[in-house]
Image (spheres, helix red, strand yellow):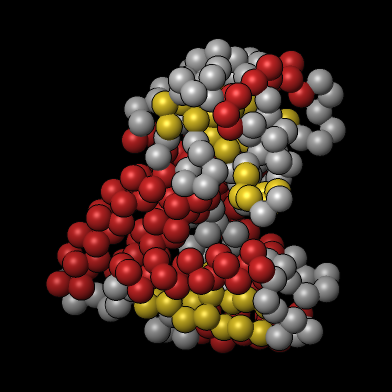
Amino acid sequence: MTARLLDGRAVARAIREEVAADLADFRAAGGPLPRLAVVQVGEDPAAAAYTRSIVRSFEGAGLACTVERLPADGTASSVLETIRRLSDDPAVHGILVQSPLPGPLTLAEAAATMAAEKDVDGAHPLNVGLLALGRPAVAPCTPVGGLELLLRAEIPIAGRHAVVVGRGPTVGRPLALLLLGLDATVTVCHSRTPDLASFTREADILVAAAGRPGLIRAAMVKSGATVLDFGVNEVDGQLVGDVAFNEVGEVADAITPVPGGTGPVTNAVLLRQVVQVARRRTAG
């Protein structure tokens, strides 16, 4: 493989060091210990694994994290009541709601129940709207982490053509808006896009966030492109991304591995956003 690896673990370490310094300054000035509350319904394996990784990250950073676990057969009203209770609790600075949720309850509806100032993952309608308007907002941690990988590797964004494959509300759509805000020319592709390769071959920055293992092949990638892989798929007991890593690595200039790419940065960004939310609430 000839491509440069965009090492998410190294970027995550750098962000955690910055968070530690910011936290020490905040606490020295009399600020409270920032606390995150995670709401998890049932024991979905992916959600449970993510919750465990969050708890480990917060313990390692010296931040407080509590988990509100509701039964898998819990009702939508019980979830909303839990979120309201946490939203009213002054000791809780940030709230993160995990999917899946019961019945017809959507993540957007659940997020709308919390106070906007406690949203640490860009899910509240206020933050979604501010991001769409190009105004300062709390954005979802995963796409923010993707930007961190680009910026810290000094990969040019302004004036470049970014193609985002996937339009989901937690990665593809917000990342497209973030890239647009940094003056990239952005194309968003999705399941109804005809001849996907005709778009991806034009990308200077190619983002894969479709949830389909091996979707992006070498023939679909422009020589010298930067490839961000947000896919998290289990195939034959192995964790793989949406990009055929080995073959695309022979064409791209830079690429994120799975695991070890975008994933580790997400948790580090979450740490940072919880401290930032605590700072704003204390100052306000």
Is residue 31 visible to us here?
yes
The spot of residue 116 in percent (x, y) is 53, 66
Q: Is residue 1 left or right of residue 40?
A: left
Depth check, front residue: 43 or 269: 43
- Nearer-the-camera pick, 218 or 265: 218
Kindly give the residue lying farthest to the left in the view shown: 28
Q: Quick one: quadrant of the C terminus?
A: bottom left
User: Could you tell me which residue is drawn at 64 percent across and 21 percent down?
Assistant: 218
Which of 227/276 is in front? Answer: 227
Judge from the rendering whether residue 161 lies leftward or rightward of residue 77; answer left or right.
left
In this view, the residue farthest toward the front is 236
Left or right of 40 on screen, residue 181: left
| Residue at 15% from the left image edge and 72% from the top image edge | 28
**Residue 136, x across and y down, in percent:** 45, 47
Total numbered badges shown on the rendered structure: 0
Could you say where residue 198 lies in the image, as x and y percent from the top left?
A: 74, 16
Front in this rendered view, residue 235 or 177: 235
> Is residue 238 positioned above or below 28 on the image?
above
What residue lies at 43% left-to-right and 77% top-to-bottom? 65
Viewer can see residue 164: no
Query: Looking at the image, is 62 positioned above or below residue 18?
Result: below
- The residue at 30%/77% (across/down) is 33
Q: Position of residue 21 (x, y in %)?
A: 20, 59
Quarter of the image holding residue 39? bottom right
